[in-house]
Image: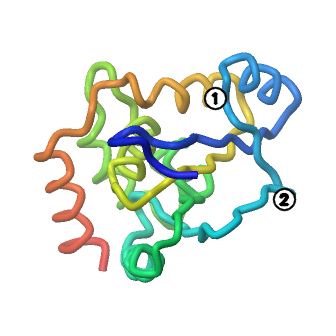
Amino acid sequence: MGRTGRKVGAIGVCPGSEAVARRARDRGCTLVGPEFALGDAGLVRYNLLDQKDANREIARLSREGRGIVATHVLAGGALAGPAAHAPLGARITQLRCLVRPGRTLVQAAVQFVLANESVSAAIIRCSSLDHLDEILDAPRAEPLSGQDLEQIFELWANRFE
């Protein structure tokens, strides 16, 4: 498990239905579930909304030379649903600044996690075919710019604490 140059080793999908599992397999995606063996990698809850503790854990695992598998990439679905998602609605509304033609908030969330060079892979739970396609199209969507990443860190530092 790991990166090849700047290329992510894997995006895993934990399918919420048989239809999602079939499409994910057809698109060459790795299916994961409770039986997923991590080997020497550590699971880290990491997303646009959960960064503080995740960054400490990622740094620790990196120092130990271990792989990092990001989980909860869509914050339990909060980043894939309506901005009224309680209690995170205000934060999600602020993150809508990342939406551009050719990039959804879901795709920005996936790109954010995979932009961290310490992250070896991401496991993303999805239950609809539309969300699966949106997730798997994230690497080809309009990429996050340096300015987008700065804006994420600024929002987090100034408003999310």
Return the x and y of residue 103 as percentages of the image width and height: 34, 27
Q: Secondary structure at mark 1?
A: helix
Q: How many numbered badges does the structure rendering display?
A: 2
Could you tell me which residue is drawn at 41 percent across and 48 percent down? 114
Return the x and y of residue 38 as percentages of the image width and height: 70, 63
Name the residue beneath numbered marker 1. 132
Q: Residues within 10 Å of mark 2 (few under 14, many from 20)?
A: few
Could you tell me which residue is drawn at 35 percent across and 49 percent down? 112
The correct choice, above or below, for 135 with respect to 32 in the image is: above
Camera-side mark, 2 or 1:
2
Nearer-the-camera pick, 133 or 121: 121
The correct choice, above or below, for 49 with respect to 99 in the image is: below
Q: Residues within 10 Å of mark 1 (few under 14, many from 20)?
A: many
Q: How is the image coloured?
A: rainbow
Res. 26 image quadrant: top right
Nearer-the-camera pick, 132 or 79: 132
**Going by the image, does 159 lie left or right of 3?**
left
Nearer-the-camera pick, 151 or 14: 14
Three-letter residue code for mark 1: Leu
Return the x and y of residue 157 as percentages of the image width and height: 21, 74
Could you tell me which residue is drawn at 56 percent across and 60 percent down? 69
Sequence-wise, which precedes: disc 2 or disc 1? Answer: 2
Residue 34 is labelled as 2
Res. 131 image quadrant: top right
**Going by the image, does 61 lie left or right of 5?**
right
Q: Secondary structure at mark 2?
A: loop
Three-letter residue code for mark 2: Pro
The correct choice, above or below, for 130 with respect to 60 in the image is: above
Return the x and y of residue 39 as percentages of the image width and height: 70, 65
Q: CA distance from mark 2 to mark 1?
A: 19 Å
Quadrant into which the C terminus falls: bottom left
Could you tell me which residue is drawn at 76 percent across and 47 percent down? 32
